[in-house]
Image (spheres, coloured by chain):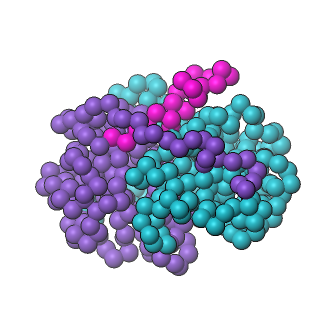
Chain colours: A cyan, B purple
């Protein structure tokens, strides 16, 4: 409860609790993700910030066992097969700049974070992974050339309580006014 | 209320509402950000996912008027001067890979999204911007070479209700099982 300042209202505290208690979930029970949970998950995802409102993103929602199996086979970053994978892509045809790196990629990450937070609020869990083979994933999903898959996001019901990863000391990562 | 499925509990609905109602806030009242709100803002920020738990991030919290003025002068992306700017940096010394682009940058974006969501839950608002001159910003903040500023995040009390940016049709950005 460390984050809850005495002055915060209950509903604010609840929201901050969702932000601070999310953990990476990598093992899932057999329970499928209910259809009626898709709307809040996906509504949250596409409500993320978007640089210049380009919305340079595209998402493929995978729930069919065959496609899940194929994705899993080419994604060493996904330890256990989840019941749902969201393939989060950067849409290069809507890039803000023109380089290999684009700030629109940061917006894809923010959308994925909204998805993970919505999952956590809904008693689901998940984990993003950039460790996958892009060429076969592109082929299975029939992604056009301008869509670049950045993250595979596993979503499902947690099989167990996720562990808390140790974090760096706050003073090592946050400074005030100047760094040096 | 479109996102609230009848089966969701009140506290889940509240969390999903925070995720779906955040808007970019670019104009701020003169009210400073209270000191006691910093803890929930920063706790939320560093609770974001981190690839391989590298935590390849660093943040400078700026509240002094002189530094705010200097940052503002070199950041055309920041329209009005906010009472608080968080400079979110990628720590290249902790990169996951070795290229110019690194998945750790996506984690910086997720941390910024947590910060923006915490701000929204606390009745503050904000906006991330990648439009700033990196060299003077690095110099003012005395950033070492391995810290690369990615986003300047304005935070403050909204001067007015933020506008909703029009969003692309859901069917244009989300597909099921395969794209093509």
Question: Left or right of B115: which side holds B49?
Answer: right
Magenta range: B1-25
- Picture coordinates of residue B178, whole percent (x, y): 75, 54
In the picture shown, does residue B91 fall above or below B50?
Answer: below
In the picture shown, does residue B165 fall above or below B54?
Answer: above
- Residue closest to the eye, A22 or B78: B78
Question: Left or right of B143: which side holds B167?
Answer: right
- Residue closest to the eye, A137 or A163: A137
Question: Left or right of B154: which side holds A132?
Answer: right
Q: Can residue A125 be seen in this view?
A: yes
Q: Residue at left 26%, top 67%?
A: B133
In the picture shown, does residue B164 fall above or below B49?
Answer: above
> In the rendered image, which quarter is residue A172 located in?
bottom left
Q: Residue at left 71%, top 65%?
A: A138
Outermost residue toward the bottom?
B98
Location of the C terminus of chain A by quadrant is bottom left
Q: Does the magenta stretch include residue B18?
A: yes
- Picture coordinates of residue A19, whole percent (x, y): 50, 41
Q: Does the magenta stretch include residue B90?
A: no
* Number of numbered labels in the structure image: 0
Q: Can residue A6 be seen in this view?
A: no
- Residue closest to the eye, A3 or B68: B68
Q: Residue at left 50%, top 37%?
A: B19
Q: Residue at left 20%, top 48%?
A: B81
Question: Left or right of A158: which side holds B118?
Answer: left
């Amino acid at each position: 409860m460390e984050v809850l300042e005495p002055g915060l209202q209950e509903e604010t505290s609840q929201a901050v609790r969702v932000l601070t208690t999310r953990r990476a979930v990598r093992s899932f029970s057999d329970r499928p993700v209910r259809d009626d949970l898709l709307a809040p998950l996906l509504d949250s995802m596409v409500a993320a910030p978007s640089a210049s409102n380009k919305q340079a993103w595209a998402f493929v929602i995978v729930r069919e066992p065959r496609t899940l199996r194929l994705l899993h086979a080419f994604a060493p970053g996904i330890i256990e097969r989840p019941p749902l994978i969201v393939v989060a892509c950067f849409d290069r045809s809507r890039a803000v700049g023109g380089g290999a790196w684009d700030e629109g990629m940061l917006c894809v990450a923010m959308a994925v974070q909204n998805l993970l937070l919505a999952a956590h609020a809904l008693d689901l869990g998940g984990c993003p992974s950039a460790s996958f083979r892009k060429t076969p994933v592109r082929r299975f999903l029939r992604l056009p050339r301008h869509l670049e898959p950045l993250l595979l996001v596993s979503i499902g019901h947690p099989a167990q309580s996720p562990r808390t990863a140790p974090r760096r000391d706050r003073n090592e990562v946050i400074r005030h006014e100047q760094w040096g």
